[in-house]
Image: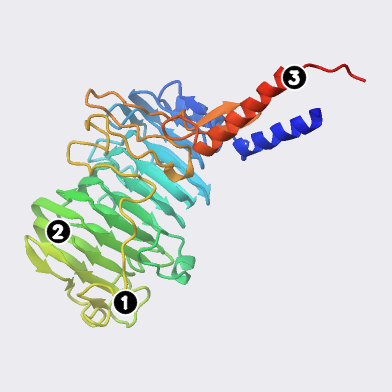
Amino acid sequence: MRMRFAFGVGVMLSLLCPNKVVADTIMAADGSTAGVQAALDTATSGDTVVIPAGTFSFAGSVTLPAGISLVGAGATVTTLAKTGGSAEALVVVECIDQPFEIRGISFVGIDDPTSGIMDKGVRVLGDCQDFRITDCTFEHFGEAAIYLRGNMRGVIDHSRFVDIYRPAIDNYGYGVVVYGDGEPSWIRPLDLGGENAVFVEDSYFEYNRHAIASNNGSRYVFRYNEIVNNVPTYQAIDAHGFEYGSPRGSRSYEIYNNTVDNAEACWAGVAIRGGDGVIFDNEAIRGTTNAILLMNGSGSGCYPCQDQIRELHIWGNTNSGDPVCAAVRGGYESVLQEDRDFFCHARPGYAPFAYPHPLTGSGPSPDAGTADAGTGDGGTSDSGVVDGGLSTRDGGAMDASGTDAAIDVGTGRARVAGGCCRVSTAGTPAPLELALTVTLLAALGRRRRRPRRNDR
């Protein structure tokens, strides 16, 4: 009898806790490099490290292990401010087929236009899958706010990128830069409209050299973003071709439903130098000389040239209210021709990937004064989806008083004896788990009520 009872309890616990994993919330002592790294060093996959509110001097960098969430109290209240002369990113992530999340943090670089230090905010390496960077602000970085290199899939959303350009460096200054995995990316199918790309959506860019740039087999989707006062002599949205020492040029890009608004004339809204993709329903409101400009990174004395544009479809874009397709930069007319290499109509059979991205849940778009979906929105949180495969939580929205409505990073999992139990977003057990829990407790109660028999 005891054996049968123990077996039944074991089965129920196995159903309740199939993975035998407990995700923990670890509070960093403070937002210093040492304090954050000490907390990260104790975390394991699925855990969340929380940085408290405050402005912290940040010397050097920390390493965020894959599978971990790094969460601040909100981009308006948790600030990591770079100190010292290192060019390394404040946060470095390396992963192989794993997610991570960074949320609710303001990253501040070197606020000195004469500095030649090529600093970065977040640097991501490897084959990260289903990652998310959200509700973050990036200011004053010389090379890039977010630097990604590898075969990646994930989303950057509801974030702000301000003053990502340093005249002393000049040829850098990327809000987001995506470097792919080179040759393997060019072997894989094109897959426009699919999930296998870096998505940047619902974000705000002000005074960047390029809001986004790419190379080396990169695949990105840039959509529903607002670009204001781009550095005048450069393009706001960019894709490199076969150039600048990369083994391969950009592979694909999907650029749509963005706005570009410049008080001072900007050279180009979108400039493409290689690869294939779609550009549609973008609006250059004012101050853009060339709404969409095409050229070839691998030169003009060839056809077809290495990694040049061959399947680019452009439609529904406007410049100061007037419909536009694309202009070919002088000298590339023999390499890039309409109805051969680019087409001024919709791509047959193309459908955009789901918006908002499934990793984000739903949330309002940011404006120039808000850093994320939650700031100042009366405490509205997102839909509580599983963010990047990590623990279930709400959006950590800021309420109208400026306090965090609920980071709730600790409610994604609840400890029980011998394992863990997943709970719903609201903090109550899911229906199957609740039924199993009631059954288990009833069985335990019946076991207690039975009179004991003498052992024989």
Classify mark 3: helix, strand or loop.
loop
Which residue was labeled with disc 3?
450
Which residue was labeled with disc 1?
310
Amino acid on which disc 3 is placed = Arg
Applied colour scheme: rainbow
3 or 1: mark nearer the eye: 3
Q: Is residue 388 left or right of residue 335?
A: right
Residue at coordinates 29% horizontally, 81% vertically from top-left?
301
- Look at the picture and state if 95 lies above or below 297: above
Q: Nearer the viewer, residue 382 or 242?
A: 382
- Marked residue nearer the N-terminal end (3 or 1): 1
Residue at coordinates 60% horizontally, 26% vertically from top-left?
416
Amino acid on which disc 1 is placed = Arg
Amino acid on which disc 2 is placed = Glu
- Marked residue nearer the N-terminal end (2 or 3): 2
For the C terminus, which image quadrant? top right
Q: Nearer the viewer, residue 254 or 332?
A: 254
Classify mark 2: helix, strand or loop.
strand
Residue 155 in percent (x, y) is at 37, 49
Residue 196 in percent (x, y) is at 42, 59
Which residue was labeled with disc 2?
283
Classify mark 1: helix, strand or loop.
loop
Q: Quadrant of residue 55?
A: top left
Residue 398 in percent (x, y) is at 28, 29
Q: Nearer the viewer, residue 233 or 114?
A: 233
**Are the residues at dot 3 and dot 1 in contact (C-beta closer than 8 Å)?**
no
For the N terminus, which image quadrant? top right
- Look at the picture and state if 188 lies above or below 376: below
Residue at coordinates 28% horizontally, 42% vertically from top-left?
363
Crowding at dot 1, Cα within 10 Å, few <14 / some 14-19 / many 20+, comes out as: many
